[in-house]
Amino acid sequence: MGQKINPTGFRIGSYLPWKSRWYADNKQYKDYLLEDIKIRKVLMDKLKLAGITRVEIERLPKSMVVTMLVSRPGVVIGRGGSGIEEVKKSILEIVKKVRGGQARDVKIDPRVVEIKNPEISAYLVASRIATELERRMPHRRVIMKAMERIMGSGAEGVKVILSGRIAGADIARTEKYHMGSVPLQTMREYIDYAQVPALLKRGYVGVKVFIHKGSDEE
């Protein structure tokens, strides 16, 4: 049986940065960790239309920098920066709930970073596949179109894995689709990975997407 590991976690520290960058003692660690989980969950749901893919959190002694990587930054910013203010209020409310209302000295600094090529973002591709599966579209056609679009956008390889009761089958199975090269064991190669569940009528179908972006990706 193969020894599986998350492609992103495999490369963190040596090639990829941490999504949360801060230090805390034993008393503060659980609060900071809970804040990060809740902030990510709220922002990923709230900014879904903006094409959000990742939320990075960096903590300083009296401030918090929240960086959102999105494909449509204008949706997040809003008119005159009204969207950024709403995001800031949402983050501050989460911090107050976790810390019991003690968040007066915390300054929230939300930042928006535009994704250069959203067509080869694993999270966006996996979310699109899951949405189309929930609309009862043929899974093979959906995946083949997605892989052709990814390869046409400059990716060096892509792999898609479906697991569950695919197409309403009585017995769960796993199907793998592959195009190009995806060297998962080469640490210097940038493999973008995402896992998104699709809630179908017969149950969940897991969607995993691996995209090989090359070795010179930032």
Image: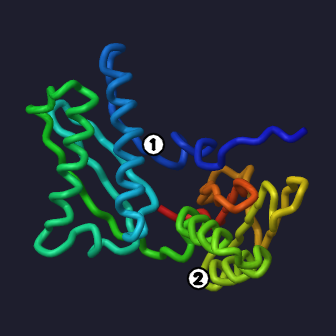
Q: Find residue 109 and report its horizontal and vertical position in percent.
A: 18, 50
Decide if residue 190 is in sight here: no
Q: Nearer the viewer, residue 160 or 2?
A: 160
For the residues labelled 2 and 1, the Cα–Cα distance comes to 27 Å
Q: Nearer the viewer, residue 80 or 7?
A: 80
Quarter where residue 201 is shown: bottom right
Decide if residue 206 is in sight here: yes
Q: Nearer the viewer, residue 68 or 197?
A: 197
Q: Secondary structure at mark 2?
A: loop
Residue at the (71%, 71%) spot, across then down: 157
Quarter where residue 91 is shown: top left
User: Looking at the rendering, in which quadrant would you find the N terminus?
Assistant: top right
Residue at the (17%, 38%) spot, across then down: 63
Say which amino acid is labelled 1: Trp
Identify the disc placed on residue 153. Answer: 2
Identify the disc placed on residue 18. Answer: 1
For marks 2 and 1, the one nearer the N-term is 1
Left or right, 29 with reference to 157: left
Left or right, 6 with reference to 74: right
Q: Characterize the local packing of mark 2: few (<14), some (14-19) or many (20 or more) Cα atoms within 10 angstroms.
A: few
Q: Find residue 110 and report its horizontal and vertical position in percent.
A: 22, 54
Residue at the (36%, 14%) spot, across then down: 26
Say which amino acid is labelled 2: Ser
Task: Give above or below for 93 relative to 208.
Answer: above
Task: Give above or below for 213 relative to 14.
Answer: below
